[in-house]
Image (tube, rainbow, N blue to C red):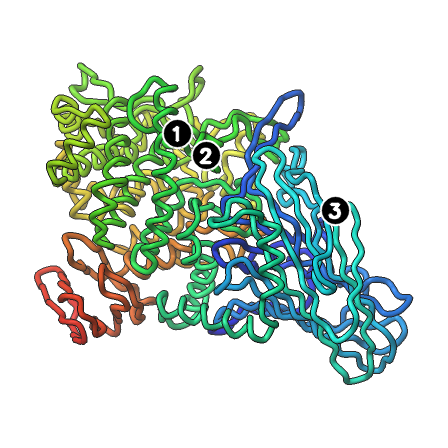
Amino acid sequence: MTGWTWEYEGYEPADERLRESLCTLGNGYFATRGALPECAADDVHYPGTYVAGCYNRLVSHVSGRAVENEDMVNVPNWLPLRFRTHGGAWLTPDTAEVLDHAQVLHLTDGVLERRTRYALAEGGTLWVRQLRLAHMADPHLAALRTEFTAHGHTGELEVEAALDGGVSNAGVTRYRDLDGHHLTHVHTGTAEADTAWLRCRTRTSDIRIGMAARLDCAEPVAVRHTRSRTVQCARLPLRPGHTATVDKVVALHTSHDPAISDPLFAAVARVERAQDFDALLDSHRTAWAQLWRRADLEVPGEAGRILRLHMFHVLQTLSPHTADLDVGVPARGLHGEAYRGHVFWDELFVLPYLDLHFPEVARALLRYRHRRLEQACTAARDAGRRGAMYPWQSGSDGREETQRLHLNPRSGRWLPDRSRLQYHVGSAVAYNVLRYCDASGDVEFLHTKGAEMLLQIARFWADAAVWDEDLGRHRIRRVMGPDEYHDAYPDAAEPGLDDNAYTNVTAAWVLARTLDVLSGLPEPRRRELGERTGLDEGELELWEEVSRTLYVPFHEGVISQFDGYGELAELDWSGYRARYDDIRRLDRILEAEGDTVNRYRASKQADVLMLGYLFRPSALKGLFSRLGVLLDDDIWRRTVDHYLHRTSHGSTLSGLVHGWVLARDRRAEAWEFCQEALRGDIADVQGGTTGEGIHLGAMAGTLDLVQRGLTGLEARDGALHLDPVPLPELSSYGFSLRHRRHWGIHLRLRHGRLEITVPHSDAGPVDVRLPGREVRLEPGETVQLTLPD
């Protein structure tokens, strides 16, 4: 890697899936994996293309069971372009001799370059250079330029460019027993001499997809059609040292697009009026330059290079184009089929970054949740609860998409999946609503859609809390916390755990903050909201009581992950580490041995420590004080130590949270976890998972670690609050952010000093608050502050 490129040298089939994920190109509307255009989907390559929000539901029959799943659809493949010399075989790196190969991801302008030198059977060599883009200015366009240069060979090169509708969802091995054929009614045709088209629709969601391709080259183009493919062909003369160029421009529309009638008509019209490749490249580069200005991040060294890659993939998945769509945050980006493209709680790690750079995108992602509020209320009613119960996994319409069974690849057994008991996802939605409104100053959203979501989430928590006379406390029973290892008590007949500390504390916070929001509403709006929801003073009094009396269990002087955690057995950590190369998925290991991780004090990822990720130390102490529970520095330090030594980090989010928490008081240990978070996908630390799609929450979370975690940055009360704790390895860096009406506020930490610049504008001053100090900056002003050691 260099400052602005990500490079792979040589062809390594075993690494192709990883490279394809990390070389994905997208624009917030769709993305295409970085597969080689001449290679079809097989055990080595997987050229998937995914449109944000394009889902389809199928029922599969596996092991005598009917299994229903909704998946993000692998739409028709626009990428195929293959080539061969006259009379020869099609050239691919798996079937021909490769003399040189390189793939370069240009982060500056979102271009993927590949260079391959093939040895020709007839003698001589063929250089192939390609430039690929998913257009960032026009999100419905993609383009591929291919340059062929022969050395020591004269003859003819046959080129075939295709649109392929015969694709399926087959990118995740453990899903392959499930039906992945989501497309039907595939038709192809020709519009103009150089333009071919393909249309189809999804089988059950009935989303119509239109795709059109224009092939630009110096030679005549012929077209032929099969049942599921349209193929454009050209024959190029090869002369030594001469370069022949073929440009493929593609347009993609679906019936979900706004302001559209027929997606095929729209695709054909768009590709016919699209400019040539050079002009498209120019406007694409301009759009990326504008994005980089808004997402400016200057971090030196290797960490900075990785952070830039992470930012690149966040922007490809959630760009300003996303603001026009009804989509959530897919946990694995638009980069692959893992997690079926579902929306989990990963937005908790993504939106805080977007709030301070692309608030219009954050707002759109919250509107995805608001549009599904009715479905969440229906789910709560079906469960016998009031309010809104957001699903652990969400897709097209907001129903619970979590599967009932999951496969343990170690044992080959299908096991109950109880992760739908992670009701804390509702608290994550509330957290994101409040953080967005604090950062953006969007009072309209807070008073309308935000207040509606907060009210129903708070109502759910108050109804879920049950009074325990013996404890003199409210309790929330039969849930799961963020740690997915524990879903039941040992030998229990029923799933779920009681009084997960993270769940209870965040529920208390939601109740308290919602009361604050409702009390701050204009009286007409509050009356209107009460009339629509049946809210009365008696219910508000209950919320107040529950927010102060939820039970937080302790054992051995530390916060218990859940009630009864202290009674679990200790795991032989050193023994398991010695027996197994990797114990990140300890749950699978123990189940394959006939045991269960439910018996042990062992966590997959941060659970209790998530509280230290969400809340600054003083705020967390205040929350516990409201609950009538003492939380001082010693108790928190012991709690961190306890779980630090009992977590296997089976999630890419775990290292991020640990690094964030430890940065406050143990900086040397913090950096180790920060490095793990940075390396999560590029080193594929989870053992093959990156090839199925990147981990968007972890990538955005590392950006937010630099932006908020190490600076102590919070946007609240109309001001920017800062409490920097720079790590020795990340003590000098800078970034820009957007705060309310101010675009491009620049902060730079350097050798114990903090410099803040507010750009010229007609907005008012910016209030900056540090421990024991306040400053006010007028637009156009720069201030330098000395930080305490």
Please tell me whether mark 1 or mark 3 is closer to you in this view.
3
> Residue 598 is drawn in which quadrant?
top left
Of the residues shown, which amino acid type is indicated by label 3? Ser
386 shown above or below 88: above
Question: What x and y, as percent, mark residue 725?
Answer: 24, 61
Q: Decide: marks 2, 1 in contact (CB < 8 A)?
A: yes
Give me the disc on residue 228. 3
Q: Which residue is mark 1?
A: 375
Disc 2 secondary structure class: loop
Q: Which residue is mark 2?
A: 397
Mark 1 closeness class: few <14, some 14–19, many ≥20 residues within 10 Å: many
Disc 3 secondary structure class: loop
User: Which residue is found at the position 25% from the left and 45% from the top?
Assistant: 445
Residue at mark 2 to residue at mark 1: CA–CA distance: 8 Å
Disc 1 secondary structure class: helix
In what quadrant of the picture does the C terminus appear? bottom left
Please state which of residues 372 and 69 is positioned toward the viewer in this rendering: 372
Mark 3 closeness class: few <14, some 14–19, many ≥20 residues within 10 Å: some
389 shown above or below 80: above
